[in-house]
Image: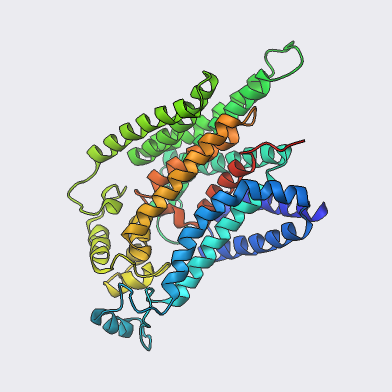
Amino acid sequence: MPLVYAAYIGLLVLIAAIPVSLFFDNLIVAGAIQLYAALSMVIIALVIRPGEARHYFKLVRVPAALAAIPLLWMLIQLLPIGIGGLSRTIWESAAGALDAKRLWASITIDPGLTLIAVSRLATMAGIAFVATVLSIDRQRAKQILLLLASAASVISLALLVSQLGGFNFKNGTNADDTNATMMTAGIVGIILFAACVIMAIERFDRRPEPRAHSSQPLVPIGAAIAGLAICSCTLIAGDTSHAIFAAACGLATVAIIYAARRLGFGPRAGLAIGSLAVVAVAMIIWTNGNHTIGDVSLRYMTDANNQVVTLNSRILDAVRLTGSGAGTYPAVSTIYGAEGSSDIRPATFAAQIAVELGRPALWVIVGLTCALIVIFARSAFSRGRDVFYPLAGAGVTVAMVLDCFTNATLTNPAISLLVAVTLGLGFGQSVGRNP
């Protein structure tokens, strides 16, 4: 199918461009991703065969239902129902600050920004679903995994060189934000390369022919370990304990599930081991947080800038449980006295969710991501030699949940693309196809 192949090539181009797109304007990158997602979804809808469509819906029905929950809440925020957390006297005066005629009686203070946020979420969901369809083919899935890992390693290598050379990258904002974004790519890279190591091991163990050349798996394993070392050295050189912890938890997720599977344990035993690990991680996180900061979404911020923390705390105290509206953080921060571009950006991605969608929505989304982890873990126990794909999805999900409480790098379209394709890859190989 030439059209599907065109969508596949387009996805490879987008992945290969991730190291460069980090430094471009976010609107340009987001626009290119949205255009690709829209065209690819149309192509897939037109050419997919009935048997492939049934298999595809089997893969994505649960993830699609999970993704629909925050999307539905964003749409509810647009409705003029008059119960929003911003429909108070103070927000009427805020209309003057926004140079708006009035703030309409809905949850969101800016319907335009919320519509943009809805579009971006739908785009990333679309990218994940496109990656799912394209990675159903085993050969394509392998190439996507290797290219994702390569893109992450290029970013990590560039950051490592800058750290050793004493210079910084800038993407039009500031060096600290760029470094944090590149480190997030390094976190993802560590987990992807761990999956590549498992891929090489599984491929060698399940070879039907005699192992006459025992050195054959050493090349792919060595290459994967080298990539893993590059990404790890970047985090160590950056001396960022939060990033190292997030990467370690994601890597531990992969290792625990894979070890439980290799030892012959079933999904229940793996779930029990994982639950114990979650309790241990939760205790470590709780004891190492800055408890002088009241809100959990700000407590683990990487750069504890008092001004930024104070601004975010004031906003969180002002908005109600319904939030200010998806995508409205820049507008709200301006109302509360944000001046520079660093003030307009949220302290953490978790804080942005709490401000825009409300505190309850933050924990609902955390719960949804935990459900994704369970889906990937169950898939890993049911898969054969392709176990490393759902393992990568589980590890990246765990790492990103932790990372979103330390910085706001997931707002970068290139990082969102990297994560979305990884999740789609895990979905695409979560269930084997019947012959």
Residue positioned 26% across, 54% down in the render: 305
Residue 412: horizontal and vertical position, in percent?
Answer: 48, 56
Would residue 434 be found to the left or right of residue 200 on screen? Answer: right
Residue 93: horizontal and vertical position, in percent?
Answer: 27, 84
Residue positioned 64% across, 39% down in the render: 429
Residue positioned 65% across, 53% down in the render: 130
Observer-nearest residue: 208 or 96?
A: 208
Q: In the rendered image, is residue 183 in sight? A: no
Q: In the rendered image, is residue 240 in sight? A: yes
Observer-nearest residue: 230 or 115?
A: 115
The quadrant where residue 244 appears: top left
The vertical placement of 319 against 51, above or below, is below
Residue 142: horizontal and vertical position, in percent?
Answer: 67, 37
Q: Residue furthest left?
A: 292
The vertical placement of 158 against 69, above or below, is above
> Considering the image in quadrants, where does the C terminus appear?
top right
Would residue 155 be found to the left or right of residue 82 on screen? Answer: right
The quadrant where residue 222 appears: top right
